[in-house]
Amino acid sequence: MSAQSAKHMIAKNIGVLGAGQLGRMLALAGYPLGNTFTFLDTTGNPSAGIGEVIVDPENQHLAAFLDKVDVVTYEFEHLPVELVKQIEQHKPVYPGSRAIAVCQNRVEEKTLFDRLGIPTPAYRVVESAEQLAAAAAELGCPVVAKSVTEGYDGKGQAVLKAPEQAQEAWDSIGHTQLIVEAFVDFVREVSMIAVRGRDGDVVFYPMAENQHVGGILRYSVAPLPDLDPSVQQTADSYIRALLDELDYVGVLALELFQTRDGSLLANEMAPRVHNSGHWTMDGAATSQFENHLRAVQGLPLGATNAIAPTCMVNVIGLEGDNAALLAIADTHLHRYDKAERPGRKLAHVNVVASSHAELLEKVRACQALIPDAPPVEWSFESTL
């Protein structure tokens, strides 16, 4: 192959650890780039429904997986770190195992935030119900207790309204070490999505405002009409510090609280494409999924500007009236081909509008067509 033809051959065989809806959306973004996809599922319950899936809960087919791929990424960070390190001995893995190790352990994550000067809510680390009660008393209730490992989408968490609830919370979480965090008087929950390429180039998406119910994301809207540019710049600096410290390649998500004085407190980060970035599929110049694939392949990163006010609406547990949803102008349905089940993410709807006022009207129309969808509540709604 000539150097010239090699220069223009961007097709890569992408290996993905995990086989859920995020992997599915990665593949859908990668096919126009000429990518092929092989998924390694370690859970025994793949749902990607696309590409080649190797089901391997016993870790018996790793060699076959590695033979099929040129570069490896992941759509699910709750993976054995040793498995990722083993793969790194044979194929490039982006993001690397250090990012997974940090994000799997809330103590390591908070320690990294502290070292980089990224503010967080006040917290304590406890190893017994007695220590939990003491931390709750010291921080002042209510507090939230979280498992140090394995918690996501509201799992492994408990809210204490009084120190006397410590034993019940400890037993319900069932872990040997917890982080206890003070509640934050925040105006809104927000998230930053950024992408770092192999060459160290970094691009940032506009900050999104998120609404959670029961620990599960229901709505994300971007860009924000009332966001002071200095707040966006602060968030950019926080996530850039993390990207550079971890020598990160790919999409990183950072969830934050914005307080009444405009300051930001970091909640947690996720080393992958993220639910709060799904709005980019229809509302940004380049989706988070395409940019992640560009990054891991060493390709130039795409523009991240929002093309219009956009809201992502998660469909949880039960399907909505899909035909009626699609009848709403500039509404885009992304289904995951999953069976209905309480608490399960089945799809999301991206709603695009010419203004935030029109967007709010359309999202409320969508909400009426989705079972159990909560009323949308945006911090900037009163200014519309």
Image: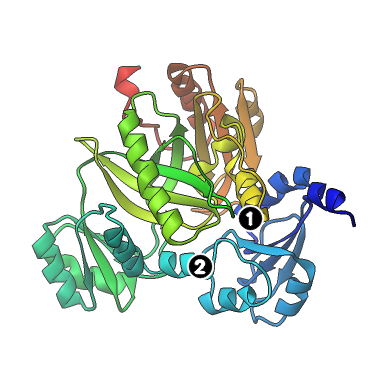
The total number of labels drawn is 2
**Structural crowding at the residue carrying mark 2, measured as other residues with C-alpha within 10 Å and reported as few (<14), some (14–19) or many (≥20):** some
Q: Given the image, on which type of amino acid does mark 1 rest?
A: Val
Query: Quadrant location of the N terminus?
Result: bottom right
379 or 45: nearer the viewer:
379
Of the numbered discs 2 and 1, the one sitting upstream in the chain is 2
- Considering the numbered disc 1 on the image, is that residue within a helix, a strand or a loop? helix
Picture layout, residue 312 above or below residue 242 = above
Q: Percent position (x, y) of residue 368?
A: 49, 29
Q: Nearer the viewer, residue 334 or 84?
A: 84
Residue 70, quarter of the rendered image: bottom right
Q: Amino acid at mark 2?
A: His
Residue 79, image quadrant = bottom right
- Which quadrant: the C terminus? top left
- Residue at image x 28%, y 62%? 115
Determine the secondary structure under disc 2.
loop
Which circle, 2 or 1, is nearer the viewer?
A: 1
Residue, x 55% and y 51% (percent of image)?
273
Query: Which residue corresponds to mark 2?
Result: 78
* Residue matched to label 1: 296
Q: How is the image coloured?
A: rainbow
